[in-house]
Amino acid sequence: MYRKIASTTFLLVLMTFSAVAADFDTFFMDKTMRVDYYHTGIKGEEIISLDAVYEEPACALLGKQLWSGSKVNLIDTLNLGKYLLKVIDTRTNQMIYSRGFCSIFGEWQTTEEAANGIYRSFHESVLLPYPKRQVQVIIANRDKYNKFYDIFSTTIDPESRFVNRESHVGNLKSAKIMYNGDPSVKVDIVILGDGYAEAEMDRFRERVRHYTKLLFTEEPFKSRKSDFNIWSVEVPSIDSGIDQPRQNIWKNNALGCSYNSMDSPRYVLTYENEAIRNIASAVPYDQIYILVNSNRYGGGGIYNLYSTCYDKDEGEQTSWWSDYVFVHEFGHAFGGLGDEYYTSDVAYSEFYPQGVDPWEPNVGIVANGTVKWASMIKKGIPVPTPWQKSLYDSLSTAIHNLDRSRSDYADQQKQISEQMHELLRDQKYWNHVGAFEGSGYASEGLYRPYLDCRMFSKSLTGFCPVCAKSIETVIDFYTR
Ligand SMILES: [Zn+2]
């Protein structure tokens, strides 16, 4: 009897395993479908309208079409992102693929412009493994309690003439910067450059090598280096540099990157989604990183959309700032991490509805004496966890009040920053996971897991244990 049960169990395990492995081949081909659409609205109102459906081209470097995402983890279990793509097999009504993501529209909806009822449209794309038969593609958004509700649905026949099969890649030069194997079991990052003129492509190549090296000196990326592939696609711009609207500087740059996105001076984004997707389609990718040819501080990172980072800081005191930005922004775009920093004069941020636990794994509310990362907090550490917040805030205000136009600005900034770091290091709960008030742009009501982290201070500090663990979970999702 015992033996019989044992062998049945064994058989069941085998069957479950083969059913999971077969899923991809049952429903998908080894290539990529891209669905482009416009996301239009104002605060509290949104509509999605279909633009076009594409079959992504073959990768010239690998000599074939392929799906770069996991072929095993087809259903998203990470629960990150404001939006969710769902793909349903219409014959069986079964969900066969899903993926969480964020969008520029989603962020823009929190701006004053959106609140004032000025309608805007943003171009967006979702990628999915190429379906073998008709599918229903659904996009869902979170309500203020973070529950998903559907906002768009369309049916796509993958064999129809409505799928555009032309290649947009042209003769762009692409390169394998670091190749560790089959893209479907690796995290594939494509690095693009914006604002590099033809004569500056050598500089772009040098910066790609620099940042690739940098990323893998940081944990958890360092230990997981063999789980990544790095690609680049070269796109020379007509002009050198990118737009700086506040300085009235305008450039003809290939990818449309600009400072002052959402009217925030150092926020670098591009709204030219279609151009970026067309260029990136030259190689398999899970993540897009755009380096911008500028030595002015700036960057941006949106979960599962892209990261941007300025090229290099030329200042003697600030030469490491771009290295800080590069990894920080990737924390947003790849790990779905939130900003742990806050401004002392913003009690509650508009960005996160009050009293609701954000979906970001490293920004949380404390309710009933607990927080979502409680399993990582050692016994005996109080929640919320005390720290000298008001003293820290007064130093932060002092930095904020410095005159940026003074020649000794960087020196003064550095001096106060060091005091702030010392203060953090002097705290009783330094190097312990807890729940420290001040996070997600809000001085009150939101908590961060650690006193310092790459998502908290402008420094070369590593990711805190909660952020590092979240990033590892995402790496596992792509590679296992
Ligand atoms: Zn953190």
Image (cartoon, helix red, strand yellow):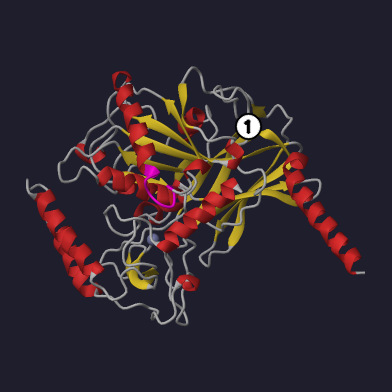
| Segment tinted magenta in the rendering | 215-222
Query: Which quadrant of the view contains residue 24?
Result: top right
Dominant secondary structure (helix, strand or loop) of the stretch shown in magenta:
loop
**What residue is shown with label 1?**
66
| Element carrying mark 1 | loop
Foreground of the two, 339 or 426? 426
Q: How far from the left and from the top, in percent, is residue 195?
A: 32, 29
218 within the magenta span:
yes
Quadrant hosting residue 385: bottom left
Amino acid tagged 1: Leu
- Crowding around mark 1 (Cα neighbors within 10 Å: few <14, some 14 to 19, many 20+) is many
Q: Is residue 301 above or below residue 285?
A: below
Measured as percent of width and height from the top left, residue 153 is found at 65, 47
Q: Is residue 60 left or right of residue 120?
A: right
Quarter for ligand 1? bottom left
Against 282, residue 96 (above or below) is: below
